[in-house]
Amino acid sequence: MTASWLPLALLVISFVTAVLIFPLHEDQVRLRMILNLGGATVKLVLVGVIFWVRLQGVELETRLPFLPDQELVLHVDYLSLIFVTLSAVLWFLTTIYAVRYLQGSPNRSRFFGFFSLCMTATMGIALAGNLVTFLVFYEMLTVVTYPLVVHRGDGRALAAGRVYLMYTLTGGTFVLLGTVWLYSVVGPTEFVMGGQIAEAAASDPATFRWIFVFLIGGLGVKAALFPLHGWLPTAMVAPAPVSALLHAVAVVKAGVFGIVRVVGDVYGMDLVNTLGLLTPLAILASVTIIYGSLRALAQDDLKCLLAYSTVSQLSYITLNIALINSTTTAKALVHLMHQGIMKVTLFFCAGLLSETLDVHRISEMKGVGRRMPLTMAA
């Protein structure tokens, strides 16, 4: 293990970008654009450096004091590398899109400040080396995405924000309770492939089943597992870049990523299978896939259709994890990347249709292909 400043630098870049953007006046358009694109570019370059170093076999880790017997750990393994790379690339693209999309919008400095803080939290989740670190950034993500959801400031946006907070804070509470409960039983829990609590679970399997239910139930809110998905279609009143961020880069990916970590690196596949928890998880994911697909087919509103599509598509990742073999795990990670790229593209297109042609529904799309051929091709 090599102590390194590189994982910490990924968080610091977007945090500093946010601090510099918040005090800018609305008319400082050029400086705000430079800070946004500069921060996203530097982060992308740094991710490339980390990717190259990690491929050389060097394990990178940053440890920071936090609680008396608990550290904040930022660790680069292959799973975190996939999530970090995906997030950095999509954040860069979303930043370019958002700068143009929000021209003329009020409160742009506030928007882009929280936008950068959102990426700080996302990188923290991706690089978390233990459950406590994951929890800290997971809760931070909830708080800093709320101003993005309510950015428009109208009644619909504020109502959607209340629903978003109700769901995500409740889910976060269950993750907190599960983390504290697990900590009280086994002490600090670091992410280790295959898990490290099997011996403790053997003596009291019922307790560890309940802890698993708390953790997965809480994470299932952001992962949009049925019936915990209700916030996601509601939050579609947010601007298109925020919708792309929620679906492709940050929030829902954080939930799914957390499930992967808990199943694979806290409990371990063998223990989860021994406790009889994989089958219920697979059933829940399967129900969500079918439910999300059927609801998507019934939608006329473009963004609601994409929201229910996300509900369905994310559960393919959870289902693959629950099927317990290396092939399906690899498929889950590939789909994590594909779904992110696909969904961010679709939300970009939906945003362009909305802002350019005032098209919000499928029933309004007649002739759109001739008027915006490149958008429809995408």
Image (cartoon, rainbow, N blue to C red):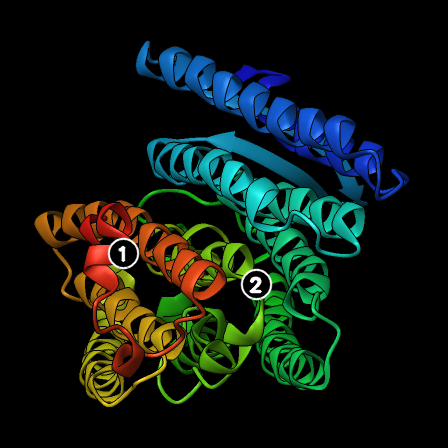
Q: Nearer the viewer, residue 182 or 44?
A: 44
Quarter of the image for residue 364 reads: bottom left
Quarter of the image for residue 128 reads: top right
Residue 342 seen in the current view: yes
* Left/right of residue 280 with respect to residue 226 in the rendered view: left
Look at mark 1 in the image and give the residue it sits on. Answer: 371
| Mark 2 Cα-neighbour bin, 10 Å: few <14, some 14–19, many ≥20 | many
Q: Nearer the viewer, residue 341 or 348?
A: 348
- Is residue 374 shown above or below 6? below
Residue 355 picture location, percent across and down: 49, 61
Residue 341 picture location, percent across and down: 30, 46
Quarter of the image for residue 33 reads: top right
* Left/right of residue 154 with respect to residue 293 in the rendered view: right
- Is residue 100 shown above or below 146? above
Residue drawn at x 50%, y 42% as measured from the top left:
97
Q: Secondary structure at mark 1?
A: helix
Kindly identify which numbered label has been placed on residue 336. Answer: none
Residue 261 seen in the current view: no
Kindly identify which numbered label has been placed on residue 239. Answer: 2
> Which amino acid is tagged 2?
Pro
> Which amino acid is tagged 1?
Arg
Q: Nearer the viewer, residue 85 or 176?
A: 85
